[in-house]
């Protein structure tokens, strides 16, 4: 975009200069050639001083090697041959944190990678105070990742990723303070563990699920036993309850011909026997 703007301005000034120099050259060829050369040099100098910064860019201007000003966004001018400009992208950047082999607090080897999100907040500090802020913040992110993971156990690493990411972010911001950078977030992506440890964790998870299933079944059996005991007490307290339950069971077997119900002892006979037994107990 900058080369396009400079070229366009150069072309416009060249046309203007040609409109002035051509009549002069017709009147005096030597003077016309000299004026054309002078105008061409002026045209190159002026066009090279035109700079353009996009909406997300800022231009840091150095005048004779010393910091001068911040320009942009939009079209701005610098003094050719005296000023130098460095354009900086102020949008949020995403940078990978390479996978690293490290040891947790409980001596488990893991391999972890992540991503860091940051942006340039103070463009002058990012250029003047650090040589390559992208490389430097990447190195600090790797160091902070190793330091924080070394203080965590494997269980904490697997269950507290968000908290660990915040701790890494705070460490990076502390180390890069004064560089004009703002860390907007750090995420842990993959956690690789040895295969034998994965198998052990899988067996542990299976055993834990089986344990919960056994406990749930035992609690259900206990609750069913309590309900059956309560039902038996209710039936014992009501003489006709057992007969009604028996009739209900017979009715629930269904009307199909395949269901055959055999009642060995009639209900009336059972009642008569129970009555005789009560009378015998009542006699002295």
Image (cartoon, rainbow, N blue to C red):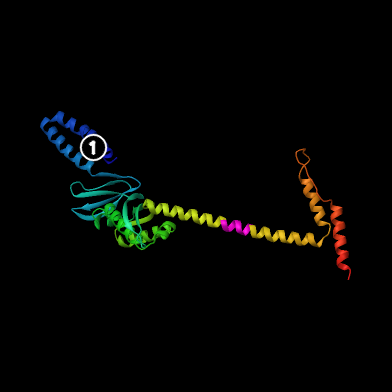
Q: Quadrant where the C terminus lies? A: bottom right
Nearer to the camera, 279 or 208: 279
Residue extending furthest toward the left: 30
Image location (x, y in percent) of residue 63: 20, 53
Q: Kindly identify the residue that appears in the image at 66 percent across and 59 percent down.
A: 223
Viewed as shown, does residue 10 lie left or right of 229? left
211 shown above or below 49: below
Nearer to the camera, 212 or 278: 278
User: Is residue 92 inside the magenta stretch?
Assistant: no
18 shown above or below 65: above
Residue 276 falls in which quadrant of the image?
A: bottom right
Element on which disc 1 rests: helix
Nearer to the camera, 248 or 161: 248
Q: Quadrant where the N terminus lies? A: top left
Q: Kindly identify the residue that appears in the image at 84 percent across and 57 percent down.
A: 240
252 shown above or below 145: above
Q: Label 1 belongs to which residue?
A: 10
Viewed as shown, does residue 220 lie left or right of 136? right
Residue 218 falls in which quadrant of the image?
A: bottom right
Q: Kindly identify the residue that appears in the image at 18 percent across and 33 percent down.
A: 21
Viewed as shown, does residue 203 lie left or right of 98? right
Q: Kindly identify the residue that appears in the image at 15 percent across and 38 percent down.
A: 38
Image location (x, y in percent) of residue 75: 30, 45
Majority SS type along the magenta span: helix
The segment highlighted magenta reads 214-220
């Amino acid at each position: 975009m900058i080369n396009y703007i400079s070229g366009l301005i150069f072309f416009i000034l060249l046309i203007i200069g040609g409109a002035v120099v051509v009549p002069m050259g017709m009147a005096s060829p030597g003077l016309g050639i000299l004026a054309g050369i002078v105008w061409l040099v002026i045209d190159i100098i002026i066009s090279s001083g035109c700079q353009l910064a996009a909406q997300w860019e800022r231009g840091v201007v150095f005048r004779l090697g010393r910091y001068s000003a911040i320009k942009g966004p939009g079209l701005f001018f610098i003094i050719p041959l005296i000023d130098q400009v460095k354009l900086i992208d102020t949008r949020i950047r995403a940078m990978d944190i390479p996978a690293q082999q490290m040891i947790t607090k409980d001596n488990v080897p893991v391999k972890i990678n992540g991503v860091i999100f940051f942006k340039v907040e103070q463009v002058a500090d990012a250029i003047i105070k650090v040589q390559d802020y992208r490389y430097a913040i990447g190195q600090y992110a790797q160091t902070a990742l190793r330091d924080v993971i070394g203080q965590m156990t494997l269980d904490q690493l697997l269950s507290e990723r968000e908290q660990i990411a915040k701790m890494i972010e705070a460490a990076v911001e502390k180390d890069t303070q004064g560089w004009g950078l703002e860390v907007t977030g750090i995420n842990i992506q993959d956690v690789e563990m040895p295969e034998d440890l994965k198998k052990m964790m899988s067996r542990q998870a299976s055993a834990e699920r089986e344990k919960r299933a056994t406990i749930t079944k035992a609690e259900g059996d206990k609750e069913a036993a309590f309900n059956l005991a309560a039902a038996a007490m209710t039936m014992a307290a009501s003489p006709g309850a057992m007969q009604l339950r028996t009739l209900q069971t017979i009715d629930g077997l269904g009307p199909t011909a395949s269901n055959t119900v055999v009642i060995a002892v009639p209900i009336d006979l059972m009642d008569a026997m129970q009555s005789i037994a009560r009378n015998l107990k009542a006699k002295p």
